[in-house]
């Protein structure tokens, strides 16, 4: 079988990269909004604190709360409390819609 090599010029690769980054931003924003809809609400502080955070580069994004100490406890639970997951279900919902 013969080897096949496909070469793209830099502008095509850059265009694909830009589109991938833009699509990632759209998906992450959907996850953020869905997580806000799913978040348990007593005071609204957790729901209002959910944001998108940048990672090491433009292709790395995170959704969560940096300001609410109990955010992770709500998501994962403890030995004494069942989880009230809102982040992982949000990601799952967005993946199912796509």
Image (cartoon, rainbow, N blue to C red):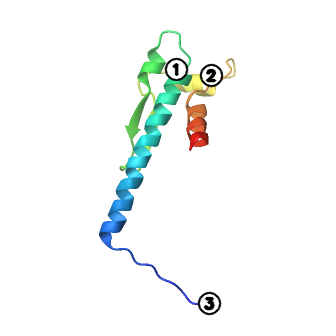
Depth check: give the residue in front, 49 or 5. 5
In this rendering, is residue 13 above or below 95?
below
In this rendering, is residue 82 above or below 63?
above
Give the class, few, some or many, for how many residues have Cα within 10 Å of label 1's Cα (few <14, many ≥20): few
What residue is at 33 percent from the left and 63 percent from the top? 14
Q: Quadrant of the C terminus?
A: top right
Location of mark 1 (residue): 70
Q: Position of residue 83 (x, y in %)?
A: 65, 23
The answer for how far apart the CA atoms under marks 1 and 2 are is 11 Å
Depth check: give the residue in front, 55 or 38. 38
Q: Secondary structure at mark 2?
A: loop
Q: Which mark, by number, is residue 84? A: 2
For residue 19, side relative to residue 38 (left or right): left
Q: Secondary structure at mark 1?
A: loop
Q: Position of residue 57 (x, y in %)?
A: 36, 50
Marks 3 and 1 close (CB-CB < 8 Å): no
């Amino acid at each position: 079988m013969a080897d096949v090599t496909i070469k793209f010029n830099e502008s095509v690769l850059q265009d694909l990269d830009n589109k991938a980054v833009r699509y990632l931003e759209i998906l992450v924003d959907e996850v953020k909004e869905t997580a806000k809809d799913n978040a348990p609400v007593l005071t609204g502080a957790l729901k209002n604190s959910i944001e998108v955070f940048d990672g090491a580069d433009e292709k790395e994004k995170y959704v969560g709360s940096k300001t609410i100490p109990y955010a992770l406890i709500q998501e994962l639970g403890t030995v004494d409390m069942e989880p009230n997951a809102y982040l992982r279900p949000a990601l799952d919902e967005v993946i199912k819609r796509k």
